[in-house]
Image (cartoon, rainbow, N blue to C red):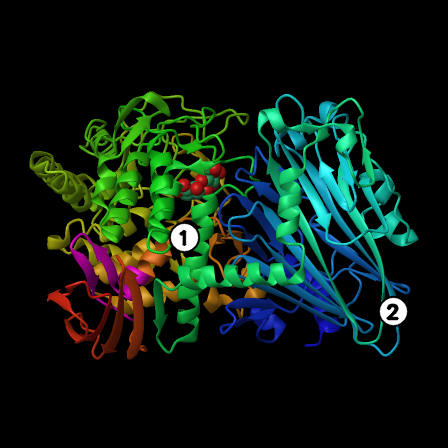
Amino acid sequence: MDLQARFFCGRIEGLEFLFQGANLEDFGGTMKFGFFDDKEREYVINEPLTPYPWINYLGNEKFFSLISNTAGGYAFYTDARLRRLTRYRYNDIPLDCNGRYFFIKDGDAIWNPGFKPMKTKLDKYECRHGFGYTKIASEKNGLAADVLYMVPNGENCEVEMVTLTNKGKSDKDISLVSFIEWCLYNGQTDGENFQRNLSTGEVEIEGSVIYHKTEYRERRNHFAFYSVNSPIDGFDTDRETFLGLHNSLDEANVILSGKSGNSVADGWSPIASHRLNCTLKAGESKTYVFILGYIENPEDKKFISEKDVKQPFKATNKYSGIVNKEKAYALQEKFSTKEKVEAAYNALRSFWDETLSHFAISTGDEKLDRMAVWNQYQCVVTYNFARSASYFESGIGRGLGFRDTSQDMLGAAHQLPSKRIRERLYDVAATQFEDGSAYHQFQPLTKRGNADIGSNFNDDPLWLVLGVGNYIRETGDKDFLKVEVPFDNSETNKATMFEHLKRSYNYIPNHMGPHGLPLIGRADWNDCLNLNCFSKDPNDSFQTCTNKEGKNAESVMIAQMFVYVTPDYAAMCRIMGDEAEAKKAEDLCKKMEAAICSAGWDGDWYIRAYDDFGHKIGSKECDDGKIFIETQGFGTMAQCGADKGYPAKALDSVKKYLDSKYGICIVDPPYSSYHVELGEVSSYPPGYKENGGIFCHNNPWVIIGEIKTGRPNDAWEHYKKIAPAYLEEISEIHRTEPYVYAQMIAGKTAGRFGEAKNSWLTGTAAWNFVALSQFICGLQPAYEGLRIEPRLPEHVKKAEMTRKFRGVTYHINVVNKKNDGKIVISVDKGNAKIDGTLVSAENGCSEVFLTATVG
Ligand code: BGC
Ligand code: NOJ
């Protein structure tokens, strides 16, 4: 389809179609908006009006940006709430219309390389989302604009390199105008405290650089800047001057008139805009480098005196001091030329190549191979943000979750430097209380537990055991267990990481209910199963209100998690020489499994929970909510009641009641009305979110359960239903990015079955990585070495896998014969000890070649 037709399809027919509910057949075939460039490892979007903004993340340490395929989004330093640098209006009309925009005026044509906000029809449009960078390339009337956006590794800035090329036959007089809108640092108050905000904005303009210095006084030691490496022909820092009070971004005064206002913001809404006029001869190119930077100054070096200002200078407020810009100059210098930017870009690409090389597969199924790459990328993003900032998470609502972050480590520990995993696990454990419970969330900047949400999610402690166990299995770094970690961030109250795990683990047996199952507290993994909430007030938040003391309601899922983590816990006890604790745990685990098999089994599947009255949840006895996925997933991962054949039965029930063509729904039938004793789960419309959506996060639990139950082909059927690369062709239905998982796909009872929401920041990333790498591909880090037990789908007869593990590169050649689970490993080259399916390199050997024959 040509570009013009695609615009129409997206804008007119497409919208109608979206309102009527999705049906691919009506659209006569595939509806792709781009393709995977596997060689470049980029997703290439060739239609700006994607079914939803398709975004990417820039930055990997402290400075981060979200960028959509039309250059929308925002930047922040470490914390999307406390240090937001540029503004973004969630829920805006139209959607996604604030970002870093370049306006090009070429004769009468005014356009943006990213299509928005002008939405001028382009002759060519392409957006390439790569790892840590995005490139947008467009053309209009023989003028090409290529823009590279990236956050260089280790730097606190977003670099934007714009190259304009005159592909026509005559000279062109062009103007290029940049635009960003500053956020007054606190993303939350910026959107609510207008009586203050509208009077505080301050800027300085020095040469070609615009500095944002709102509140840079006694309490704020940081400022931001937006620079360009060329003299400018005008600038603006006042939004109203730039736009005109009643105009939107596609009718900005400064853009339409072709004249910048040279405005100096004074309160209201400060922005940064540069104007560059240039003449391009036929065939000529020009490159500009823009930098959006963040600087912190020491208390005693914040200001300089007026006589030290060298360049043309303007500032908002003559009473506030002049910003000391030394560090900003140094940062500007680092990327002052095209060559320097290209070097940083190459370094960034090498960084990602290395990062993603720790697990690599070639199976002959191109979509599967793609998933391996993109899934790992998404795991790094969830490591960085947990659930804090995406196009569905405002960046002000949630910091980092205790449970979320602990499990995100499952997808990150194999690829990021161990220092970063240790640091994050340390931060999580430091928000734990002495009794083993924990703050449910904490802020990334302050690392303090979030008192608003508080504690009492009784599953939280166990995720830490899982996260630490996985880290130690991956790295062999046993000393981490001996590191001293604070409770509740108190430097005077510390205990070893092992002691933290002990408190975590024992929190469960210390909080048991009437059926010998763990008490649920405010909720377990399912944040919406609020069994002690009993809320009748629409002004209550389900997440924070608890009206019952919580002495009755129990979670079968926590019981199964307890069984699942016990082997890890016992192994760590033994590493620490605590045999008594290991034995005690194994005994408790047996008892727990017995309780699951009696009080937690419903005949054909595992029960979900008991409510405050002792009634079953997720049982045949219920009218709605008869079966939940979580306990079928964790129950089969933990193989509870395996001797009685429970896992296979439970998995059959999943297929019968929960499965659908777009994935496994979380509960069936969904609740059709509100149940005061169940809370938020029953407040969602049937088919959405926790009330019957396809909650992608727990699909991999079933996948893992299937493999543990010896059914790799069933695992595969579940895997490919939600893996985004397999959904690319139904992008009109799925709507979110085909390169990352979403938290939820509307379930079979929903009006918009198959439509995804909340892409990027979800535990789905880490868990599907576990399902893929450790179970489908079967490469499991174990305490004593690497376990190799591939359970690939039938159609993959041969595969090559590479796994870097504890400094050794393992190359594994898999021959999948009958796929019957009988696995024989042999060494082709290198030195390794083999014990069944457990392999470990020996005698300092750093590269081992193996063959794994299955069946
Ligand atoms: C959502 C959950 C989420 C929770 C905490 C609920 O409304 O449905 O998915 O985890 O809020 O923010
Ligand atoms: C999203 C939360 O971030 C996660 O912690 C939770 O488990 C799921 N929602 C399910 O409620």
Left or right: 678 in relation to 793:
right
Quarter holding the C terminus is: bottom left
The disc label shown at residue 764, or none: 1
Task: Name the secondary structure under disc 2.
Answer: strand
Q: Residue at x 51, y 49 (%)?
A: 154
Are circles 1 and 2 on residues that touch, CB within 8 Å? no
Q: Residues within 10 Å of mark 1 (few under 14, many from 20)?
A: many
Residue 254 at least partly seen: yes
Task: Depth check: give the residue in front, 28 or 51.
Answer: 51
Residue 791 counted in the magenta span: yes
Amino acid carrying label 1: it is: Thr
Left or right: 634 in relation to 740:
left
The disc label shown at residue 305, or none: none
x, y percentage for residue 137? 68, 67
Q: Which picture quadrant has residue 124?
A: bottom right
- Whole-angstrom CA distance, mark 1 to mark 2, is 50 Å
Range drawn in magenta: 773-792
Task: Depth check: give the residue in front, 409 or 160.
Answer: 160
x, y percentage for residue 562? 22, 40
x, y percentage for residue 845? 20, 66
Give the vertical position of 658 relative to 461 (above or below): below
Q: Residues within 10 Å of mark 2 (few under 14, many from 20)?
A: many
